[in-house]
Amino acid sequence: MSILALTSDTLVGTPGAGQIEYNGQFFGTDSNASRAQMQRITQGTAVASTSGTSIDFTGLPAWVKRITVILSGVSTSGTSNLVCRIGDGSISSSGYASGATRIGTSGAVATSTAGYLLTGDNGSASIHHGSVLITNISSNSWTTFGVLSRSDDGFSNISGGSKTLSATLDRVRITTVIGTDTFDAGSINILYEG
Protein backbone atom coordinates (compact mmCIF):
# COMPACT_ATOMS: atom_id res chain seq x y z
CA MET A 1 0.00 0.00 0.00
CA SER A 2 1.31 3.45 -0.95
CA ILE A 3 0.65 6.73 0.82
CA LEU A 4 1.06 10.16 -0.74
CA ALA A 5 1.89 12.86 1.78
CA LEU A 6 1.99 16.52 0.80
CA THR A 7 4.05 18.30 3.42
CA SER A 8 4.60 21.70 1.83
CA ASP A 9 2.60 24.18 -0.17
CA THR A 10 5.73 25.36 -2.00
CA LEU A 11 6.55 23.86 -5.38
CA VAL A 12 10.23 22.96 -5.59
CA GLY A 13 11.28 22.85 -9.22
CA THR A 14 9.28 21.55 -12.14
CA PRO A 15 7.23 18.42 -11.48
CA GLY A 16 8.87 15.44 -13.12
CA ALA A 17 7.28 12.55 -14.98
CA GLY A 18 4.97 10.53 -12.74
CA GLN A 19 5.04 13.05 -9.90
CA ILE A 20 2.26 15.00 -8.27
CA GLU A 21 3.17 18.15 -6.42
CA TYR A 22 1.16 20.91 -4.84
CA ASN A 23 1.40 24.67 -4.99
CA GLY A 24 -2.21 25.70 -4.69
CA GLN A 25 -2.71 23.49 -7.74
CA PHE A 26 -2.12 19.84 -8.56
CA PHE A 27 0.32 18.67 -11.20
CA GLY A 28 0.55 15.26 -12.81
CA THR A 29 1.44 13.54 -16.03
CA ASP A 30 -0.80 12.11 -18.70
CA SER A 31 -0.21 8.85 -20.56
CA ASN A 32 2.30 10.57 -22.84
CA ALA A 33 4.30 11.82 -19.83
CA SER A 34 3.58 15.47 -20.62
CA ARG A 35 2.96 17.63 -17.60
CA ALA A 36 -0.67 18.60 -16.94
CA GLN A 37 -2.01 21.12 -14.45
CA MET A 38 -5.23 20.06 -12.76
CA GLN A 39 -7.08 22.82 -10.96
CA ARG A 40 -8.99 21.90 -7.85
CA ILE A 41 -12.55 23.02 -7.23
CA THR A 42 -12.55 26.43 -5.55
CA GLN A 43 -15.49 27.75 -3.55
CA GLY A 44 -16.32 31.45 -3.63
CA THR A 45 -17.70 33.43 -0.73
CA ALA A 46 -21.46 33.14 -0.26
CA VAL A 47 -23.30 36.43 -0.74
CA ALA A 48 -26.59 37.16 1.01
CA SER A 49 -29.20 37.84 -1.68
CA THR A 50 -31.24 40.06 0.63
CA SER A 51 -30.72 43.43 -1.06
CA GLY A 52 -29.61 45.02 -4.29
CA THR A 53 -30.54 44.29 -7.90
CA SER A 54 -27.58 42.02 -8.74
CA ILE A 55 -25.05 39.67 -7.16
CA ASP A 56 -21.57 39.69 -8.76
CA PHE A 57 -18.63 37.29 -8.57
CA THR A 58 -15.54 38.87 -10.13
CA GLY A 59 -11.83 38.11 -10.47
CA LEU A 60 -12.29 34.58 -11.81
CA PRO A 61 -8.96 33.11 -12.99
CA ALA A 62 -8.25 32.70 -16.72
CA TRP A 63 -7.94 28.90 -16.35
CA VAL A 64 -11.60 28.44 -15.32
CA LYS A 65 -13.51 25.99 -17.54
CA ARG A 66 -16.60 25.35 -15.41
CA ILE A 67 -18.56 27.44 -12.92
CA THR A 68 -21.41 26.24 -10.73
CA VAL A 69 -23.76 28.94 -9.45
CA ILE A 70 -25.64 27.83 -6.33
CA LEU A 71 -28.87 29.46 -5.12
CA SER A 72 -30.39 28.79 -1.69
CA GLY A 73 -33.75 30.32 -0.78
CA VAL A 74 -33.38 33.14 -3.33
CA SER A 75 -36.31 35.49 -3.83
CA THR A 76 -36.85 38.87 -5.48
CA SER A 77 -39.32 41.71 -5.00
CA GLY A 78 -40.94 41.38 -8.42
CA THR A 79 -41.92 39.05 -11.26
CA SER A 80 -39.02 39.48 -13.70
CA ASN A 81 -37.27 36.18 -14.47
CA LEU A 82 -33.87 35.45 -12.93
CA VAL A 83 -30.90 35.53 -15.30
CA CYS A 84 -27.20 34.80 -15.11
CA ARG A 85 -24.81 37.00 -17.09
CA ILE A 86 -21.12 36.53 -17.78
CA GLY A 87 -18.41 38.97 -18.76
CA ASP A 88 -14.83 39.65 -19.78
CA GLY A 89 -13.94 42.90 -18.02
CA SER A 90 -17.56 44.00 -17.84
CA ILE A 91 -20.88 42.16 -17.75
CA SER A 92 -22.43 41.33 -21.12
CA SER A 93 -26.20 41.91 -21.34
CA SER A 94 -26.82 40.89 -24.96
CA GLY A 95 -26.09 38.10 -27.44
CA TYR A 96 -27.32 35.16 -25.37
CA ALA A 97 -29.38 32.27 -26.75
CA SER A 98 -31.35 31.19 -23.72
CA GLY A 99 -34.56 29.54 -22.63
CA ALA A 100 -36.24 28.28 -19.47
CA THR A 101 -39.34 26.28 -18.67
CA ARG A 102 -41.29 26.08 -15.43
CA ILE A 103 -42.47 22.50 -15.00
CA GLY A 104 -45.83 22.11 -13.29
CA THR A 105 -49.54 22.56 -13.77
CA SER A 106 -49.06 26.25 -14.51
CA GLY A 107 -45.91 25.80 -16.60
CA ALA A 108 -44.43 28.78 -18.39
CA VAL A 109 -41.83 29.06 -21.15
CA ALA A 110 -39.51 32.03 -21.67
CA THR A 111 -36.61 32.98 -23.94
CA SER A 112 -34.03 35.74 -23.64
CA THR A 113 -31.04 37.27 -25.41
CA ALA A 114 -30.25 39.46 -22.35
CA GLY A 115 -28.77 36.67 -20.21
CA TYR A 116 -28.92 32.98 -19.38
CA LEU A 117 -32.48 32.56 -18.13
CA LEU A 118 -32.72 30.67 -14.84
CA THR A 119 -36.51 30.74 -14.51
CA GLY A 120 -39.41 30.45 -16.93
CA ASP A 121 -41.78 31.99 -14.41
CA ASN A 122 -40.98 34.11 -11.38
CA GLY A 123 -43.04 35.88 -8.76
CA SER A 124 -42.45 38.01 -5.69
CA ALA A 125 -43.34 34.97 -3.55
CA SER A 126 -41.09 32.55 -5.48
CA ILE A 127 -38.29 30.97 -3.45
CA HIS A 128 -35.61 29.28 -5.58
CA HIS A 129 -33.09 26.56 -4.68
CA GLY A 130 -30.68 24.76 -6.98
CA SER A 131 -27.71 25.26 -9.24
CA VAL A 132 -26.67 26.34 -12.72
CA LEU A 133 -23.64 24.90 -14.49
CA ILE A 134 -21.72 27.25 -16.82
CA THR A 135 -19.35 25.22 -19.02
CA ASN A 136 -16.69 26.27 -21.52
CA ILE A 137 -17.10 24.71 -24.98
CA SER A 138 -13.94 26.15 -26.51
CA SER A 139 -12.08 29.44 -26.47
CA ASN A 140 -14.58 32.05 -25.17
CA SER A 141 -17.81 30.11 -25.85
CA TRP A 142 -19.92 29.07 -22.86
CA THR A 143 -23.13 27.10 -22.27
CA THR A 144 -25.41 26.70 -19.26
CA PHE A 145 -27.71 24.08 -17.84
CA GLY A 146 -29.71 24.73 -14.70
CA VAL A 147 -32.34 23.24 -12.44
CA LEU A 148 -34.02 25.37 -9.78
CA SER A 149 -36.78 24.10 -7.51
CA ARG A 150 -39.32 26.39 -5.88
CA SER A 151 -40.03 25.65 -2.23
CA ASP A 152 -43.08 27.95 -2.26
CA ASP A 153 -45.05 25.75 -4.69
CA GLY A 154 -42.93 22.64 -5.42
CA PHE A 155 -42.51 23.35 -9.14
CA SER A 156 -39.14 23.42 -10.90
CA ASN A 157 -37.42 25.48 -13.60
CA ILE A 158 -35.12 23.91 -16.20
CA SER A 159 -32.93 26.23 -18.24
CA GLY A 160 -30.15 26.24 -20.83
CA GLY A 161 -28.32 28.62 -23.11
CA SER A 162 -25.12 29.66 -24.86
CA LYS A 163 -23.00 32.80 -25.23
CA THR A 164 -19.66 33.68 -26.81
CA LEU A 165 -17.58 36.42 -25.23
CA SER A 166 -14.93 38.46 -27.05
CA ALA A 167 -12.26 37.73 -24.41
CA THR A 168 -11.59 35.51 -21.39
CA LEU A 169 -14.46 35.17 -18.89
CA ASP A 170 -13.65 36.74 -15.52
CA ARG A 171 -17.03 37.46 -13.91
CA VAL A 172 -20.58 36.19 -13.33
CA ARG A 173 -23.69 38.14 -12.32
CA ILE A 174 -27.09 36.98 -11.06
CA THR A 175 -29.88 39.48 -11.64
CA THR A 176 -33.30 39.73 -13.29
CA VAL A 177 -34.20 40.35 -16.92
CA ILE A 178 -35.36 43.92 -16.27
CA GLY A 179 -32.58 44.47 -13.70
CA THR A 180 -34.61 46.57 -11.27
CA ASP A 181 -36.26 43.93 -9.05
CA THR A 182 -34.37 43.65 -5.76
CA PHE A 183 -33.24 40.50 -3.98
CA ASP A 184 -35.01 40.00 -0.67
CA ALA A 185 -34.08 36.51 0.61
CA GLY A 186 -31.50 33.74 0.43
CA SER A 187 -27.87 33.43 -0.54
CA ILE A 188 -25.83 32.76 -3.70
CA ASN A 189 -22.36 31.26 -4.12
CA ILE A 190 -20.18 29.77 -6.85
CA LEU A 191 -17.74 26.92 -7.34
CA TYR A 192 -15.19 27.12 -10.14
CA GLU A 193 -12.71 24.67 -11.62
CA GLY A 194 -10.30 24.22 -14.52
Image (cartoon, rainbow, N blue to C red):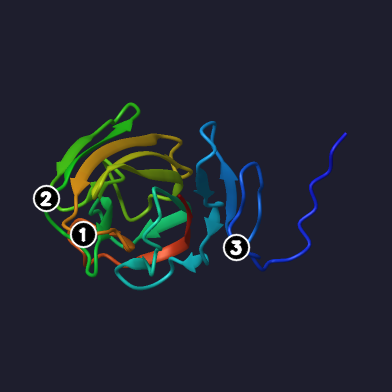
Q: In percent of the image, x 40 and y 54: which residue is there? A: 64
Residue 24 - label: 3
Q: Residue furthest right?
A: 1
Q: Nearer the viewer, mark 2 or mark 3?
A: 3
Query: Is disc 1 placed on a helix, strand or loop?
Result: loop
Give the quarter of the figure containing the N terminus. Answer: top right
Q: Nearer the viewer, mark 1 or mark 2?
A: 1
Disc 3 to disc 1, how far (Cα)? 25 Å
Q: In percent of the image, x 21 and y 52: which residue is there? A: 115
Which residue matches tag 2?
A: 95
Q: Quadrant of residue 86?
A: bottom left
Q: Residue furthest top?
A: 105
Which amino acid type corresponds to the residue marked 3 in the rendered image?
A: Gly
Q: Earlier in the sequence, mark 2 or mark 3?
A: 3
> In the rendered structure, are the residues bearing label 3 and label 1 in contact, judged by CB atoms less than 8 Å apart?
no
> In the rendered structure, are the residues bearing label 2 and label 3 in contact, judged by CB atoms less than 8 Å apart?
no
113 over 137 or under it: above or below: below
Disc 2 to disc 3, how far (Cα)? 35 Å
Q: Earlier in the sequence, mark 3 or mark 1?
A: 3
Residue 54 in the image, given as x and y percentages of width and height: 31, 67
Query: Is disc 2 placed on a helix, strand or loop?
Result: loop
How many C-alpha atoms fall within 10 Å of the one at disc 2: few (<14), some, or many (≥20)? some
Q: Is residue 149 left or right of residue 178?
A: right
Which amino acid type corresponds to the residue marked 1 in the rendered image?
A: Ala
Which amino acid type corresponds to the residue marked 2 in the rendered image?
A: Gly
Query: Is disc 3 placed on a helix, strand or loop?
Result: loop
Residue 167 - label: 1
Disc 1 to disc 2, how far (Cα)? 14 Å
Q: In percent of the image, x 32 and y 63: which residue is there? A: 170
